[in-house]
């Protein structure tokens, strides 16, 4: 949440910052701002998206080779020009951008007020910049020391960049809890919340460590801790190509990412399944094989769509590996004083690898001595670095705020993990091996479903004005129902609920009338007959039914108003297929309603605050 970017070098900073902010905009888009340094600090900030800021700055043309920018997801203080970052100290000496939350800002604000400080915004961030100013006046030797003294008083999470007007050729960077990546170029440095703004300039990066600090100057840089202990920087090379973070001919990232799924699923499988015998190999789990073999239980911790992937995995892990599974919202788990045994395996599922609650949940699990693993997309992210073992999903950058290809890649990798652990625990069967051989064919099946795009568009026309939607599924398709409902509400703002189909009779059936569209996910599996009965119950009560069914199902075709077919496959793999029509339907309905599918209101892709 919130994107930060800073530049110091010999090029004009402003265009680099604006381009960087556009690449980070998926992290928050309530407001944007830049600070540029040329003798004095010039700050421009505006409520709304980065393009509003660009229009506002126009051709003001500040000639500066040092600067920083911010795109905000509002926490403290409504989205407004005043509450936008950068924030400046009252003396004008310091400017600061911040991603995170200063939890004790009220106490600090009171302290500063007693010293005559006044505040113009309602943000926690302004308190921090004034606190830096305070320590500067109290005799700190330089800006860096003032920042360090201020950070010692702060409780909360931050990724910050600070500029000081009287030390113009320098950016001061620090992090605790919020991610910071430093791009190390030739005579220039770019600091950002993630690698996206950096890769056009350099592939050499340093992931700033927790409670780390960096001083970037035109002629070099220093890495240290917030406690001023020098650290030897670990320079890493990132393997991200620019085209993977561009729209590549599509109008929206979300559509691009939906359409990309045959490739992204294939990437998740690549090199991990032996096509001749269906045996699974996961290099990231080799070192923890013994602990997996002897594990008492698996606990998945995740949020949002990743939590839905965990629900799918629950079925698969229990079925394949015969190991008890719990699936927890990370935010609930961490505050519940949960019972965690040293022989538990806690698996964090996270696209971004930065979700604050998920990070906190794995910290708790680590302290309890459990084996902590990650199923993560973003290479080098905090969860990837903070877990003992794990499997990258390799879906490639996902930029649309509503997750699509990350879900299918998470489910793919979790399916592989379930079989891998079954192999270790001796519960693998020939059926599982044949399912793995079928998994290799899933990308082609997804490709086929994507050909229904025009038909799904025509279904969307019918339901574009709906105010409610019900999604029903059983077994492995229950989490898909939850995911379908989440996609629709996230991007089209239609109220939608997902339910296990059998639970319909315990409440949601009361909602059914001619205005209630009901999406049934009813592929051929062991509960097929039961779900057909549920479907009939809805039809009898006048509900409008859309059904996702197995190819060739004529039974449901006679009952439902609209039928979307998915190819036949092993029932254990069906979520990878049945979720695709859900994504497309939500996308088209949202587009027809004029919604911004890539940046839906109030949401952010990377939830780095608790
Ligand atoms: C946000 C995003 C969702 C995502 C969730 C968890 O809510 O909008 O798309 O599923 O965070 O994020 P993570 O990066 O941990 O998977």
Image: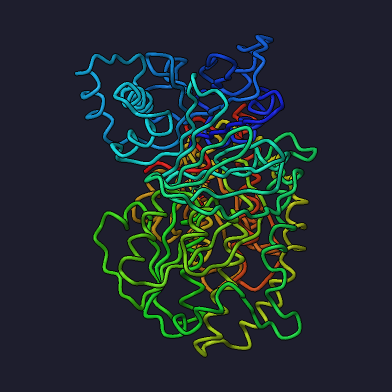
Q: Nearer the viewer, residue 401 or 579?
A: 401
- Seen from the viewer's position, the closer of residues 78 and 412 is 78
Does residue 560 appear to the left or right of 499 in the view shown? Answer: right
Please give the name of the residue rendered at 42% of the width and 85% of the height, measured from the top-left corner: 294
Can the viewer see residue 76 in this picture?
A: no
Residue 126, above or below 436: above
State the image quarter where residue 217 is shown: top right
Closer to the camera in the image, 129 or 328: 129
Residue found at the far right of this picture: 249
Circle count: 0
Residue 61, placed above or below residue 546: above
Is residue 75 toward the left or the right of residue 285 in the image?
Answer: left
- How far across and how far down the image is residue 413, in percent? 59, 67
Where residue 308 appears, as percent x and y from the top left, is: 48, 57
Quadrant including the C terminus: top left
Q: Is residue 563 above or below residue 461?
A: below
Percent across and percent down for residue 266 are 72, 63
Residue in view at x 65 percent, y 37 percent: 197
């Amino acid at each position: 949440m919130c994107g930060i970017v800073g530049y110091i070098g010999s090029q004009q900073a402003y265009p680099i910052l604006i381009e960087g902010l556009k690449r980070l905009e998926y992290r928050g888009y309530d407001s944007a701002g830049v600070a540029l340094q040329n003798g004095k600090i010039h700050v421009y900030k505006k409520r709304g998206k980065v393009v509003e800021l660009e229009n506002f700055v126009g051709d003001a043309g500040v000639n500066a080779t040092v600067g920083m920018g911010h795109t905000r997801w509002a926490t403290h203080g409504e989205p407004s020009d005043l509450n936008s970052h950068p924030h400046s100290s009252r003396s004008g000496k310091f400017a600061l951008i911040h991603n995170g939350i200063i939890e004790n800002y009220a106490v600090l604000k009171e302290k500063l007020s007693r010293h005559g400080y006044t505040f113009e915004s309602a943000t926690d961030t302004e308190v921090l910049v004034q606190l830096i100013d305070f320590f500067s006046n109290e005799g700190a030797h330089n800006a860096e020391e003032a920042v360090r003294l201020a950070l010692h008083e702060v409780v909360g999470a931050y990724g910050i960049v600070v500029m000081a007007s009287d030390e113009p050729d320098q950016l001061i960077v620090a992090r605790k809890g919020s991610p910071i990546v430093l791009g190390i170029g030739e005579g220039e440095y770019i600091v950002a919340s993630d690698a996206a703004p950096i890769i056009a300039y350099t592939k050499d990066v340093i992931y700033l460590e927790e409670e780390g600090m960096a001083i970037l100057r035109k002629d070099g840089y220093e890495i240290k801790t917030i406690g001023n202990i020098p650290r030897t920087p670990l320079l890493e090379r990132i393997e991200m190509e620019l085209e993977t973070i561009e729209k590549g001919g599509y109008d929206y990232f979300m559509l691009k990412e939906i359409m990309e799924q045959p490739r992204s699923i294939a990437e998740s499988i690549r090199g991990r399944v032996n096509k001749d015998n269906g045996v699974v190999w996961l290099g990231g789990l080799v070192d923890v094989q013994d602990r997996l073999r002897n594990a008492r239980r698996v606990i998945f911790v995740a949020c949002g769509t990743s939590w839905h992937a965990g629900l799918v995995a629950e079925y698969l892990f229990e079925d394949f590996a015969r190991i008890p599974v719990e699936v927890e919202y990370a935010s609930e788990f961490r505050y519940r004083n949960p019972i965690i045994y040293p022989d538990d395996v806690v698996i964090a599922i996270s696209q971004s690898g930065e979700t604050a609650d998920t990070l906190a949940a794995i910290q708790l699990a680590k302290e309890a001595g459990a084996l902590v693993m990650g199923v993560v997309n973003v290479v080098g992210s905090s969860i990837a670095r903070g877990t003992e073992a794990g499997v990258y999903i390799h879906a490639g950058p996902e930029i649309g705020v509503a997750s699509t290809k990350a879900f299918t890649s998470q489910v793919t990798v979790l399916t592989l993990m379930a079989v891998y652990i079954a192999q270790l625990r001796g519960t693998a069967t020939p059926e599982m091996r044949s399912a793995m051989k079928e998994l290799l064919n899933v990308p082609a099946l997804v490709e086929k479903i994507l050909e229904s795009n025009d038909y799904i568009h025509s279904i969307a026309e019918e339901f574009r004005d709906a105010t409610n939607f019900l999604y029903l599924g059983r077994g492995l398709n229950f989490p898909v129902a939850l995911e379908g409902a989440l996609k629709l509400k996230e991007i089209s703002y239609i109220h939608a609920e997902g339910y296990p189909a059998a639970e319909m009779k315990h409440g949601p059936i009361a909602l059914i009338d001619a205005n209630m569209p009901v999406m049934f996910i009813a592929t051929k599996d062991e509960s097929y007959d039961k779900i057909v009965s549920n479907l009939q119950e809805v039809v009898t009560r006048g509900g409008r039914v859309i059904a996702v069914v197995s190819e060739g199902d004529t039974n449901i075709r006679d009952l439902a108003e609209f039928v979307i077919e998915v190819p036949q496959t092993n029932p254990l793999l069906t979520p990878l297929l049945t979720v695709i029509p859900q994504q497309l339907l939500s996308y088209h309905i949202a587009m027809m309603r004029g919604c911004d599918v890539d940046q839906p209101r109030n949401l952010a892709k990377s939830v780095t605050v608790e």
